[in-house]
Amino acid sequence: MRDRTFREDDSKVRTGTLPRAMASLRNLAISVFRQNNETNIVAALRHTSRYYSRPLRTLGLT
């Protein structure tokens, strides 16, 4: 699911610890959406990314 949603195979990040960090951030995003009972992760990503305050609200930081 992570490959289709976040297109991991197309990522240019290949050196150092950055690939592991990016995978961790992707897992965090998926986990947050699943905790919020989102069934369609792609739609949730699109909705959240449209405005700068939505990711913070999704994480409960505002």
Image (spheres, rainbow, N blue to C red):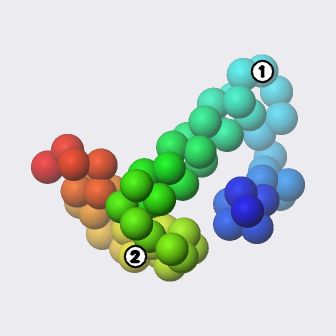
Distance of mark 2 from mark 1, alpha carbons?
32 Å
Residue 41 appearing in the image: yes
Where residue 52 sits, quadrant-wise, is: bottom left
Q: Residues within 10 Å of mark 1 (few under 14, many from 20)?
A: few
> From the viewer's perspective, is residue 4 above or below residue 20?
below
Which residue in the protein does label 2 denote?
47
> From the viewer's perspective, is residue 29 above or below residue 39?
above
**Amino acid tagged 1:** Gly
62 displayed left or right of 21: left
Percent of width and height locating residue 48: 38, 68
Q: Are marks 2 and 1 in contact (CB under 8 Å)?
A: no
| Residue displayed at 59% across by 47% down | 26
Which is nearer the N-term, disc 2 or disc 1?
A: 1
15 displayed left or right of 20: right
Disc 1 secondary structure class: loop
Q: Nearer the viewer, residue 52 or 57?
A: 57
Disc 2 secondary structure class: helix
Residue 61 badge: none
| Residue displayed at 67% across by 40% down | 23
Percent of width and height locating residue 55: 33, 56
14 displayed left or right of 42: right
**Amino acid tagged 2:** His
Q: Residue farthest to the top?
A: 16
Residue 49 appearing in the image: no
Position of the N terminus, as image quadrant, is bottom right
Which residue in the protein does label 1 denote?
16
| Residue displayed at 54% across by 69% down | 41
> From the viewer's perspective, is residue 2 above or below residue 22?
below
